[in-house]
Each structure stands twice: as structure tokens, then as C-alpha cells.
Image (spheres, rainbow, N blue to C red):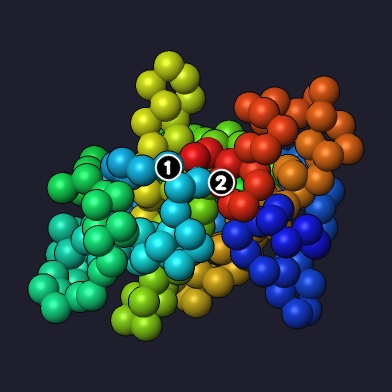
Amino acid sequence: MAENSSFVAKPARGWLHPDSVLASDGITYAVRYIGCMEVLTSMKKLDFETRSQVAKECIARVCAAAGLRSADKKRRVSQAAASALAAKPRMAHSGSNVALTVSSRAITLAALEGGETVARHDMPRVSFASGGDADSLDFVAYVAKSAPPAEWRACYVLECGGRLAQDVIATIGQAFELRFKEFLTKPSSVNINGSRALCGGGGGG
């Protein structure tokens, strides 16, 4: 695997799914949507450790806003990570049970009841994904930008019960890498917003 083609290391046992599945309909998980926070800084400008801190801090703040955990005033967060996040979480749709569908084309969150789309991001606009701290291992956060002209960048928090979090992160990483490979082999057929878009886990900025 190209070192800069994904933000998730390929598991020792190999990727979880056949590439052909992720290249077509994708993989769907039943998860709970908790909320999101605007991200004020491009992920491309942050090193890997700071990106991880941004995701973990977003999980902590969104979960506190949802009443899933108490706010920890003693949390140590770097200035770069703290300043990358907006002041308040956005909690629309918080607590909704959603179908998370991951493919090499996009990440989609759709309400299990009614099918309303909560969020959809083309894979080139996804820039990072990570799990939570030791006390929030069932949570996953991913950073992505909305489509033009708004191009609103945010970190989305999901609760993945049944120890699904690591599988979800690995699946997003596999889809991200597959998209990168598709671009390298068929650049004319993959809209990727520039040849460097996915390098360093910074597809969506």
C-alpha cells in the first residue's frame, strides 16, 4: 500500500471486504448518528497526530452535548487541535439510527426510518477518520467537506455498537485507498479534484 494513500494502516489480516463490493454498492453498517462540529482548518495543514486529536476532541465534545458522557475539563488538547474546531457542536438528527454506507464513491448516512439522507460525502471529499479515546471506543469520527459551492468542512460522529468501530474505520480506509488506486489507474474517469487530492489522508482538505 502506498504510504500516503490512506489514513488507516492495512490490517495484518488484510482488508475486510472484496474491493469489488466497495467499488459497487458498498458496505452498510447500522450505527447511531450523534452530531457534528465544523472544522475550521484544512486537514492538509495538520500532522497525523493533530488530525487524530481533532477527531477525538470532536467525539468528546459531541458526546458531551448529546449527554452520552460528561464534559472533561481536564482533557489535554493541543492548541492546534482545539483551534481547528468551532465553538459548538451541531446536533441536528442527533440520536438517529442510520445506515452508514461506505463505497469507493462516497460515504452516506441515511435514516433507518424514512430513509432521509443525513449526510453524503463523495470519497475525494473525505479527509480523515479515527476512533475515540479509551473511554469512547465505540465511536468513530470522520472529517469531510460538503459539495460546492458551500464546501462546509465538518467532523461527523457515529456510535458503532457491538465493537464495530474498528471495522468501520478499516472499511473507510479501504474505500479511501481503493479510490486512490482508481484515480492512479483511471484518472480521466475519477473526479478527484486534482491529482494530489487524496495524498496524505487529505482528500477533502
| Residue to which mark 1 is pinned | 42
Depicted 79 relative to depicted 146: above or below: below
Is residue 151 something one can see in this rendering?
Answer: yes
Label at residue 202: 2
Q: Quadrant of the N terminus?
A: bottom right
Percent across and percent down for residue 92 are 24, 41
Q: Nearer the viewer, residue 73 or 123?
A: 73
Picture residue at 13% right of the left edge, 70% below the top: 71
Residue drawn at (55%, 71%) of the image? 166
Query: Is residue 1 found left or right of 61 in the rendered image?
Result: right
Mark 1–mark 2 contact, CB under 8 Å? yes
The residue sitting at 78% across, 79% down in the picture is 13
Q: Mark 1: which amino acid?
A: Ser
The reply to whether residue 99 is in sight is no
Q: Classify mark 2: residues with Cα within 10 Å, few (<14), some (14-19) or many (20+).
A: many
Cα separation between marks 1 and 2: 8 Å
Q: Residue at x 63, y 27 (%)?
A: 193
- Residue 4 placement (x, y as % from top left): 69, 56
129 shown above or below 42:
below
Q: Residues within 10 Å of mark 1 (few under 14, many from 20)?
A: some
Q: Tell me the amino acid under the disc marked 2.
A: Gly
Across and down, in percent, residue 191 comes to: 70, 26
